[in-house]
Image (cartoon, grey):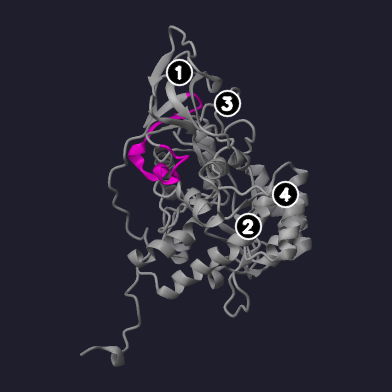
Amino acid sequence: MGFVAADSGVVLRGGRVIDGLGRAPFNADVRIDGDSIVAVGRNLQAAPTDRVLDVTGKTVMPGLIDSHCHISFDEPNSNDELFFHRREGLAAIIAAAHVGKLLRAGVTGFLDADSLFDIGVDLRDAIEAGIVVGPRMATGGNALLTAAGGTAGRLIPDVGRIGYGRVVSSRDEIVAEVRRQIKIGVDWIKVHVTGLTPRQKIKGEVQVWNLEELKLVVNTAHDLGVPVVGHCRGASSTRDAARAGFDMILHATYMDDEALEAVVAAKVPIVPTFTFQANLLDYGAEVGASDSVRELFRKEIEESAVMLRRAFEAGVPLLCGTESGFSLTPYGDWHYRELEVFVRDLGFTPLEAIRAATSENAFALGLAGRTGAVEPGRLADLIVVDGDPAADVTVLGAPDKIQHVILGGREVHVPEPPPRTDPPGWRGTTYGSRILRKSGLKR
């Protein structure tokens, strides 16, 4: 895996351009010099030392950006596996291997908002140093949790760290942990504003932080120049995250009118991240998911889509993220999928969905206006696609259709990874799918 040696320039000749800004596709050449696009137009002149790629009949577009990708998780089947079967050193090495799968899928940038241990910071630094070949990466540290909250329920301890989460229980602990993470170099602070409790009475998840605590996180992080992102599944959590000044919200499902009003007033970008639910709904039978679980996730998409669409129409940016990193969303397979869901369930046009996955999504990398579009002055983070995503975004999910990946002006070649054999204890195991009651035996 590596880069093609850089020339003085590269010209992509004769392609159909999707600029990532929402404009209709047009035929043009694209000239790259160094790490940036310097010209887009018809019949561009190539310098004698330029490398010319004939992309006639192909689509030239920005590389995809995935604003919700858990690169350190390594595709677990359960929270038990994620929390108790991962060692720091091996997890870091495997995460470095996974970023190549993203490049193969046409992903040139991603946000990993929370990671096991502090892997995200170290992996990002290794990519930026050229030690690991991977997409542009922004990262958080451990997600901030309360003892009551998180999507792992009773697996969450009362104190300390588990998996990707750090439990904080007082104002002093909140401030100290935000400052610790910023000291080690995170790009984002993430808060699990909601979690699952055993006897909850509401749809979605329970809000486990109050407004004043959320404001404390935001004020502490913003004082040091770092944005805050929140995991919010529920109306009150989405409302309070917006009111507290969060810079981005993940999910924002089950919004009511009050929550919608708050996100519209704040114009806070939302990353719905429906890929996990859509995969479970559409392919759950393939992995043994029950009909009741599949129905639960179908309703989450259906009942949330209307409000998310209203937010978008009121000027709230909706960004594409896939929750890649779980067994239902393995790396390299589903990074196009959120675009499909945006078109199918949120009523986006293909070009609107592409914009949400490229130029709009550059915000998640801290590179708004600098990448994610095919126009002069932008970083040359591009893909060449054998097909027309403006007609059908699912072409982006066919690996053989991503014919060139260009990152910072240099073409990347990423071979298909070899089969792997996991070490003992790395994956969780079960005895079976049910309790072996004698009364339930067939003989």
Q: Position of residue 355 (x, y in %)?
A: 56, 40
In the image, is 308 to the left or to the right of 214?
left
Q: CA distance from mark 4 to mark 3?
A: 26 Å
Q: Position of residue 146 (x, y in %)?
A: 65, 65
Residue under numbered circle 1? 11
Vertical placement of residue 297 versus 388, above or below: below
- For marks 4 and 2 on the same chain, the one whose residue lies earlier in the sequence: 4
Q: CA distance from mark 1 to mark 4?
A: 38 Å
Q: Secondary structure at mark 4?
A: loop
Residue under numbered circle 4? 267
Quarter of the figure that contains the C terminus: bottom left
- Span of residues in magenta: 388-409
Residue 231 visible in the snapshot: no
- For marks 2 and 3 on the same chain, the one whose residue lies earlier in the sequence: 2
Q: Position of residue 59 (x, y in %)?
A: 43, 31
User: Which of the pair 397/35 is nearer the observer?
Assistant: 397
What amino acid is labelled 4 in the image?
Lys
- For marks 4 and 3 on the same chain, the one whose residue lies earlier in the sequence: 4
What amino acid is labelled 3 in the image?
Glu
Count of marks, rendered view: 4
Q: Secondary structure at mark 2?
A: helix
Residues at badges 1 and 2 in contact (C-beta under 8 Å)? no
- For marks 1 and 3 on the same chain, the one whose residue lies earlier in the sequence: 1
